[in-house]
């Protein structure tokens, strides 16, 4: 018997948490002498008030869907993959190599190979921590964190060396070329007569992210492998009884997780920058953890949470323009508060709410 | 032994504990319904009932873990509020849990003092406790070395530490929750001697159990709970096990299984010189030779920890052994490829594991998902090469749950929401419905209520009569005797001997379990 109706568990709790976060953020804004209602207004307007705003919001959403899904797949096997950041960075290297190696004639041809490049490199970066966890018992949290640093260093090395565009100072590759250009929403929607901002970076990758969410849902709840992963995540001793190999599940779950992280590069490297640049992940790997936590490791929840965090990201940047009194650091504080309340403190409101529902039930029946 | 040891207090004295009209609900589930009970001082009061009857909830209310929705508690005649366990301790109530709450790498002394230290420095408290512990040990024959590390102690001694903890906190009323569940028969006897001694010294003891024998052996009074209600309180001397069982289940219960004679067929499983060394390097199986025939139940008796679990683990495919094994004439790999649980199931060996909550079931999975657990790679559960046939599994699970009388028969409920007996029925249903040639069964009725025990025993016998070879491991000698067609006794990784149940008795098997072979003709 669950103590709380399901809708309260999945919808009401996140809602209350967001509200609490905004109240606290509002108090902070008030403390520096700004109007908190202006803050909320400008954030929402910045994120959703124009097709350009929406375009940016969806662009960030795409990133967070990939990294959120990545974290959730590992989490279903009770593996805390904190290495999304590094896996995405290495996925970017894979994408760039594929797109630089061949003068692609058309994006429909380039995309499948770029996806393979991104996923294989991302998965490869997760493979070593996965192997160490499965065979040697090295804790996945420690190894994946360390691999984030190694990935960062590797990117710097490559972008200042073999991958660097010749005769130039900036640590970046050359442009991939028109044949590898992913259609933006502007290009995708104009045939249907819909005006979408030209400057917004949202592109075909968003469709890919939604497809990935559907596939992850199928994988986790409809396949034998997903069953193995969930069984392993819930009870390691039971998987031994059932004959599910813990080594196999650990490694496969981490490979899928790393591969999904790597796909972030399709959106950012192939879709937006159209070349490999330094630090393109920009914390989206870590953000995926909060997204997955808030989305309760369910693809549908992750898409919604990714959208919320996408709004937050975009709205926060707009705030810088609209409210000069709010500094960049203050925006980070507001974003961090919301992440803490919706991600890390997701269980804080559960207990009191549960008690409330038990009392209500008693009164009713 | 129940009579005569009462200190002869008149029944007119104030009860040590009196509960009146206690009710407690968890959501829609009424765990305790208007319960009243009087426990007289200086007596051992048994509370029996099936799993989920509300015994533990009632004791948790008394110990301050839960707050009752209604009702009052009187201790020694005074109305007492018990909002938390601190208040319970202050009121002189001590509790010994089924799963001990001891710090494994602390000494006995440190465990006893833990939470009752006085002052900032530890040394004076420890010195004081040492003296008190010696006094208690002499007074109640509760001897434990105060400087032993708890993890080095046997389970029986760990339990003594729990009792000492309660006495150190000056408990006059002791609650013991299923205290013999983890003990060997000898340890249980020792425990009962200690309890009798405590009673002589005037302590009041509440014994929660579902074992009728214990109730008959040690208690003065017994209260029966069924579905959250107290159905009867009777003097132990005026009742019988059959009567109590009837009160618990609400109908007549067959305590002894009637089974037709077995017709053993050809050998299905043949083990020669089976050995197994565990991860700590301890040899758990030291050369086991066993044969198992079609249509028979081979019972493995033994005190827990003498290799029976290892035998199940190796045969069930999650520990690597050495030696020779053949299944239906074909070699059965004991290590490496083809020796995992999935291959075992595929080759026709089903397994009801000893620990259903950690091995047999995924508690967070629904009943229907659990109904496929271990078999979820089998072709019959697939819709196509990629996806599982979830709808088909659900339908099959619903039918199985109906046949095996799993209550509630809702396949969408998570395993953790079923009672112990019904969880076991889910495991048994799954393994039986997979139509194995050999079924390994470990502790089939551990922590299972009487109604379900009867049902599960009947299922095992029916399965035998269908020609399945059954290997039964149980620490309950009663169960071994009533089910087995042949009994093998394990001691220290060896088979001490095989006996036919009608040609031996509990005494002889008990001696074999202790490693003593009688030189009888």
Image (spheres, coloured by chain):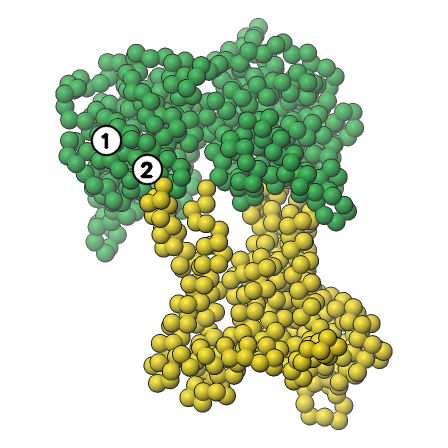
Chain colours: A yellow, B green
- Does B48 sit left or right of B287 as displayed? left
Residue corresponding to mark 1: B20
Residue corresponding to mark 2: B24
- Judging depth in this view, the residue of A213 and B81 nearest the camera is A213
- Name the quadrant containing residue A280: bottom right
- Does B99 sit left or right of B503 as displayed? left
On the question of residue B268 being in view, the answer is yes
- Judging depth in this view, the residue of B438 and B31 nearest the camera is B31
- Judging depth in this view, the residue of B216 and A176 nearest the camera is A176
Q: How many marks?
A: 2
Task: Give the image location of residue B470, x and y in percent.
Answer: 64, 22
At 48% from the left edge and 87% from the top edge, which residue is drawn?
A322
Q: Are marks 1 and 2 on the same chain?
A: yes
Task: Give the image location of residue A260, x and y in percent.
Answer: 67, 64
On the question of residue A283 being in view, the answer is no
Task: Give the image location of residue B315, x and y in percent.
Answer: 66, 32
- Does B198 sit left or right of B483 as displayed? left
At 47% from the left edge and 65% from the top edge, which residue is drawn?
A342
Identify the image quadrant of the C terminus of chain B: top right
Label 1 lies in what chain?
B
Cα distance in 3D space between marks 1 and 2: 12 Å
At mark 2, the secondary structure is: strand
């Amino acid at each position: 018997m669950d103590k709380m109706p399901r809708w309260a568990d999945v919808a009401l709790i996140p809602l209350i948490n967001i509200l609490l976060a905004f109240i606290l953020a509002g108090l902070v804004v008030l403390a520096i002498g700004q109007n908190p209602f202006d803050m909320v207004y400008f954030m929402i307007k910045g994120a959703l008030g124009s097709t350009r705003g929406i375009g940016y919001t969806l662009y960030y959403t795409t990133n967070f869907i990939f990294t959120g899904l990545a974290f959730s797949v590992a989490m279903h096997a009770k593996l805390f993959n904190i290495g999304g950041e590094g896996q995405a960075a290495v996925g970017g290297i894979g994408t760039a190599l594929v797109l630089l190696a061949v003068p692609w004639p058309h994006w429909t041809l380039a995309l499948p190979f770029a996806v393979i490049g991104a996923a294989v490199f991302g998965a490869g970066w997760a493979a070593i921590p996965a192997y160490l966890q499965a065979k040697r018992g090295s804790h996945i949290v420690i190894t994946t964190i360390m691999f984030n640093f190694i990935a960062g260093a590797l990117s710097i090395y490559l972008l200042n060396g073999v991958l660097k565009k010749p005769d130039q100072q900036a640590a970046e590759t050359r442009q991939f070329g028109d044949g590898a250009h992913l259609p933006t929403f502007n290009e995708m929607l104009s045939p249907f007569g819909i005006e979408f901002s030209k400057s917004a970076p949202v592109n075909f990758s968003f469709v890919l992210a939604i497809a990935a969410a559907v596939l992850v849902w199928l994988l986790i709840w409809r396949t034998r492998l997903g069953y193995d992963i969930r069984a392993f995540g819930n009870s390691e001793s039971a998987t031994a009884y059932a004959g599910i190999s813990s080594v196999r599940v650990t490694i496969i779950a981490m490979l899928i997780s790393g591969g999904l992280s790597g796909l972030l590069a399709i959106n950012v490297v192939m879709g937006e920058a159209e070349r490999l640049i330094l630090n393109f992940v920009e914390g989206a790997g870590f953000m995926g953890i909060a997204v997955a936590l808030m989305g309760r490791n369910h693809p549908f929840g992750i898409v919604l949470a990714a959208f919320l965090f996408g709004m937050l990201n975009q709205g926060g940047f707009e705030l810088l323009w609209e409210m000069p009194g709010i500094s960049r650091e203050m925006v980070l504080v507001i974003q961090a508060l919301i992440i803490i309340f919706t991600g890390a403190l997701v269980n804080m409101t559960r207990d009191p709410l549960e008690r409330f529902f038990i009392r209500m039930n008693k009164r009713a029946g | 032994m129940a009579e005569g040891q009462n200190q002869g207090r008149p029944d007119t004295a104030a009860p040590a504990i009196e509960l009146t009209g206690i009710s407690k609900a968890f959501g829609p589930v009424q765990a305790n319904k208007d319960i009243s009970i009087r426990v007289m001082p200086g007596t051992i009061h048994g509370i029996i009932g099936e799993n989920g009857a509300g015994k533990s909830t009632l004791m948790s209310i008394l110990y301050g873990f839960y707050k009752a929705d209604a009702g009052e508690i009187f201790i020694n005649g005074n109305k007492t509020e018990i909002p938390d366990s601190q208040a319970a301790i202050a009121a002189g109530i001590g509790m010994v849990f089924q799963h001990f709450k001891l710090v494994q790498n602390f000494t006995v002394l440190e465990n006893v003092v833990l939470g009752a230290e006085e002052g900032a420095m530890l040394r004076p408290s420890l010195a004081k406790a040492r003296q008190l512990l010696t006094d208690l040990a002499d007074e109640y024959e509760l001897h434990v070395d105060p400087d032993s590390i708890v993890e080095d102690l046997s389970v029986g001694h760990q339990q003594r530490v729990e009792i000492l903890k309660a006495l150190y906190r000056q408990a006059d009323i002791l609650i013991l929750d299923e205290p013999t569940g983890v003990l060997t028969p000898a340890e249980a006897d020792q425990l009962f001697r200690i309890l009798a001694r405590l009673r002589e010294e005037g302590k009041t003891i509440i014994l929660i159990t579902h074992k009728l024998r214990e109730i008959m052996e040690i208690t003065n009074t017994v209260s029966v709970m069924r579905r959250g209600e107290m159905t009867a309180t009777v003097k132990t001397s005026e009742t019988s096990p059959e009567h109590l069982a009837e009160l618990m289940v609400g109908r007549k219960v067959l305590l002894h299984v009637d089974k037709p004679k077995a017709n053993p067929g050809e050998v299905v499983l043949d083990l020669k010189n089976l050995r197994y060394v565990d991860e700590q390097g301890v040899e758990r199986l030291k050369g086991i030779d066993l044969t198992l025939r079609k249509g028979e139940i081979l019972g493995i008796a033994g005190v827990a920890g003498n290799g029976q679990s290892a035998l199940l683990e190796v045969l069930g495919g999650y520990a690597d052994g050495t030696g020779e094994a053949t299944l239906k004439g074909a070699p059965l790999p004991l290590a490496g490829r083809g020796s995992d649980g999935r291959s075992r199931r595929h080759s026709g060996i089903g397994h009801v594991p000893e620990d259903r909550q950690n091995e047999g079931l995924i508690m967070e999975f629904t009943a229907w998902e659990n109904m496929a657990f271990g078999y979820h790679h089998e072709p019959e559960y697939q819709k196509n090469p990629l996806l599982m046939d979830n709808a088909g599994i659900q339908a099959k699970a619903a039918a199985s749950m109906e046949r095996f009388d799993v209550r509630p028969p809702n396949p969408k409920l998570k395993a953790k929401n079923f009672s112990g007996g019904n969880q076991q029925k889910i495991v048994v249903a799954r393994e039986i419905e997979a139509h194995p040639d050999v079924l390994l069964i470990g502790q089939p009725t551990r922590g299972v209520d009487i109604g379900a025990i009867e049902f599960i025993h009947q299922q095992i016998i029916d399965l035998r009569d269908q020609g399945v070879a059954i290997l039964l491991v149980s620490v309950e000698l009663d169960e071994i005797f009533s089910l087995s067609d042949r009994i093998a006794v394990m001691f220290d990784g060896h088979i001490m001997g095989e006996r036919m149940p009608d040609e031996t008795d509990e005494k002889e098997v008990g001696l074999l379990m202790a490693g003593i072979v009688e030189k009888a003709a």
